[in-house]
Image: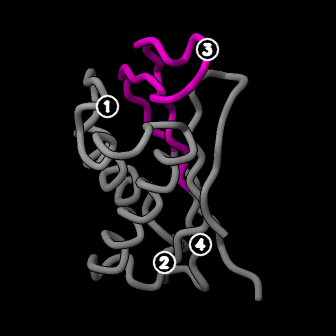
Amino acid sequence: MKNFGVKIRVEFPAAHHIRGYEGECARPHGHNFKVEVEATSPGISNIGIALDFRDLKEMTKELANRFDHQDLNTIAPFTDINPTAETLAQYFFEELERLVQRNPKTQTVTMKRVTVWENDRSAASYGY
């Protein structure tokens, strides 16, 4: 089945460290994280829009604002799990999936994938 796809990206700076890791990433360090969100819709509105970029970006920014200029290891759920690019991608995907389903303007939208970039060369994704 073919769908329309929409993709947005938001950024936030934050610090983290990887507990149990043997290497430099075990020490506190920071990134300008980029969160790339992909969603699909089976159709488009009468004005030709599958999903307003602004709606998806606002939902993503709402989540990212929790982590902006913070130590990720001190914010749940990352007090219990390592704040890796993989677990951040999963967190954003699952939280956005909930927000999309609750919003009447986005109920026909399906989350496809979230990719979290630590830098321009390293990223991890979670989704379908």
Disc 4 + disc 2, Cβ < 8 Å: yes
Q: Earlier in the sequence, mark 4 or mark 3?
A: 3
**Distance between the Cα atoms at labels 1 and 2?**
31 Å
Residue 122 located within the stretch drawn in magenta: no
Image: 102 above or below 60: below
Asked whether the beta carbons under mark 4 and mark 3 sit within 8 Å of each other, the answer is: no
**Which mark is in front, 4 or 3?**
3
Q: Specify which label sits upstream in the sequence, 2 or 3.
A: 3
Magenta span: 9-37
Which residue, given by chain and number where applicable, does mark 1 sit on?
Answer: 73
- Under mark 4, the amino acid is Thr
* Front position in the image: 79 or 12: 79
Kindly identify the residue that appears in the image at 40 percent across and 45 percent down: 81
Residue that numbered label 3 is attached to: 23
Lateral position of residue 11 relative to residue 86, left or right? left
Say whether disc 1 or disc 2 marks the residue closer to the N-terminus. 1
Say which quadrant the N terminus sits in: bottom right
Q: Which is more foreground, mark 2 or mark 3?
A: 3
Mark found first going from the N terminus, 1 or 4: 4
SS label for mark 4:
strand
Q: With 80 as the anchor, is 4 left or right in this view? A: right
Rate crowding at label 1 as few (under 14), some (14 to 19) or many (20 or more) other CA atoms within 10 Å. Answer: many
Tell me the SS state at disc 1.
helix
Q: Is residue 11 depicted above or below 86 in this figure? A: above
| Residue that lies at the very extreme toward the bottom in this rendered image | 1
Q: Nearer the viewer, residue 84 or 9?
A: 84
Mark 4 lies on residue: 40
Residue 89: x, y in percent?
A: 52, 49
Residue beneath label 2, please? 109
